Image: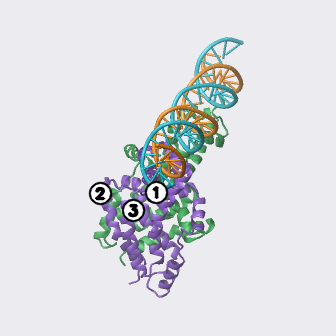
Chain colours: A green, B purple, C cyan, D orange
DNA sequence: AAGTTTGTCAACCATTTGGTTAAACTAAAT
DNA sequence: ATTTAGTTTAACCAAATGGTTGACAAACTT
């Protein structure tokens, strides 16, 4: 046997599966296509992952656990609210620019299969916002930021960060720009988003 | 023959197809399931729409043309910027609360098949934001709103309106609320979104 | 060296799926 | 009453798809 160099085949499968699943989604992905992409026989997929479903779940969990840490940052970091928003927006946008299919993939499959959410929560993969909520309420009372529900602020932050990637085809159509120009808009958003949010909530 | 009463069967097919396609997406949708939902034989689908692809396109176009008018409102209405934002957010959220699967469906299929965008643009189904852009630039110069690129403002408006629906499963998990509570959050957003945006850009 | 375990592949299988066909049925038009 | 055109169905079909099997090879174990 190939002396388990570092699990070449198994990781090759996972990488190919990631690429295909993220681009096409669970339903449209084909096992043969994943095998081809990995340059191996279709049987190997089943040898290492038993079924399409299990292979998919491996991919999904791996993808999700790339995003979770990012989200934890805004929730549980030990910095001011404004700093959190700045850091998160800058980091998140940079991250997704490198993994453009990730957010759409996760959102999509979560919509397709709501039970996944319960599973992930059960596995404690899900951060929750109670700490963030507390911090927001505090700052509202202190008169540092305008009155806003922590939930709404959280939704706004996430929306402004994630949607421009998921809705890229639509937005490109509306504002009528090519891929490069759109990418530049995303680069600008690394700071643009935080400015926009802070402008809205900060009391001068 | 049925004197084309109002195309009972044909419209039943379209409705069922809408339901199934919007819930599952093109790839996961099954012709048999659509037929079952419509309470008819599978052959009828092909009789009226020839193929899955054509049936899908009929559904997609119908869905998209329900959204386009809403978007035109913010772009081409003859009102102040602030009013546009208020109207759009209130109308759009109300609309999507009635059609919860629509945005996800459209975004999804647009990502899966970017050529659709070109097709839609060619068919002039796509509004473009040149008028909105002009209005924003004007108001920035007049000192009514803070300096911001029209494109970024547009992206922000759309993101804040659409994402909370597309990302509902994820957001529900993060903020840890049940469906009813989340729906109430969405209701609140009818005014919350506009306030948030206007707070950010308005010069007092 | 013999035997065991692990990895790989080509061929195969059962099921699902989109799509077709030909016949039966319906109701208006002649 | 018969024709005619649209509508509906059951039975089929070919292709695609996820998954299995058995042979075989390449280490590792003893």
Q: Earlier in the sequence, mark 2 or mark 1?
A: 1
Q: Please name which of the two marks, 2 or 1, marks the residue nearer to the observer.
A: 1
> Looking at the picture, does residue B75 appear above or below residue C9?
below
According to the picture, the residue beneath numbered tag 1 turns out to be: B104
Query: Disc 3: which chain?
Result: B
Could you say which is closer to the camera, residue B163 or residue C20?
C20
**Which numbered dot is residue A74?**
none
Quarter of the figure with the C terminus of chain B: bottom left
Q: Quadrant of residue A135?
A: bottom left
Q: Position of residue A185 (x, y in %)?
A: 56, 69
Q: Is A177 situated left or right of A194 in this image?
A: right
Could you say which is closer to the camera, residue A123 or residue B127?
B127
Query: Disc 2: which chain?
Result: B
Q: Is the residue marked by circle 3 packed among few (<14), some (14-19), or many (20+) residues within 10 Å?
A: some
Q: Quadrant of residue B84?
A: bottom left
According to the picture, the residue beneath numbered tag 2 turns out to be: B181
Is any atom of residue A22 visible in this view? no
Q: Residue furthest bottom?
A: B142
> Looking at the picture, does residue D25 appear above or below residue A123?
above
Residue drawn at (38%, 69%) of the image: B91
According to the picture, the residue beneath numbered tag 3 turns out to be: B96
Could you say which is closer to the camera, residue B107 or residue C26?
C26
Could you say which is closer to the camera, residue B2 or residue A133?
B2
Tally the marks.
3
Mark 1 and mark 3 on one chain: yes
């Amino acid at each position: 046997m190939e002396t388990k160099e570092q699990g070449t085949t198994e990781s090759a499968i996972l990488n190919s599966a990631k690429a295909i699943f993220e681009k096409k989604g669970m339903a449209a992905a084909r096992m043969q296509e994943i095998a081809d992409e990995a340059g191996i026989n279709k049987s190997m997929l089943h040898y290492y992952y038993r079924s399409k479903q299990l292979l998919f779940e491996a991919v999904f969990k791996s993808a999700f656990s790339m995003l979770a840490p990012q989200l934890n940052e805004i929730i549980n970091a030990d910095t001011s609210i404004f700093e959190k928003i700045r850091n998160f927006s800058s980091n998140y946008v940079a991250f997704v620019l490198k993994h453009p299919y990730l957010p759409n993939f996760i959102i999509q499959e979560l919509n397709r299969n709501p039970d996944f959410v319960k599973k992930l929560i059960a596995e404690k993969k899900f951060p929750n916002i109670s700490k963030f909520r507390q911090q927001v309420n505090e700052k509202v009372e202190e008169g540092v930021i305008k009155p806003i529900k922590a939930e709404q602020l959280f939704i706004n932050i996430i929306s402004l960060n994630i949607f421009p990637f998921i809705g890229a085809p639509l937005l490109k159509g509306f504002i009528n720009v090519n891929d490069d120009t759109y990418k530049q808009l995303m680069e600008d958003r690394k700071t643009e988003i935080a400015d926009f949010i802070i402008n809205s909530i900060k009391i001068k």
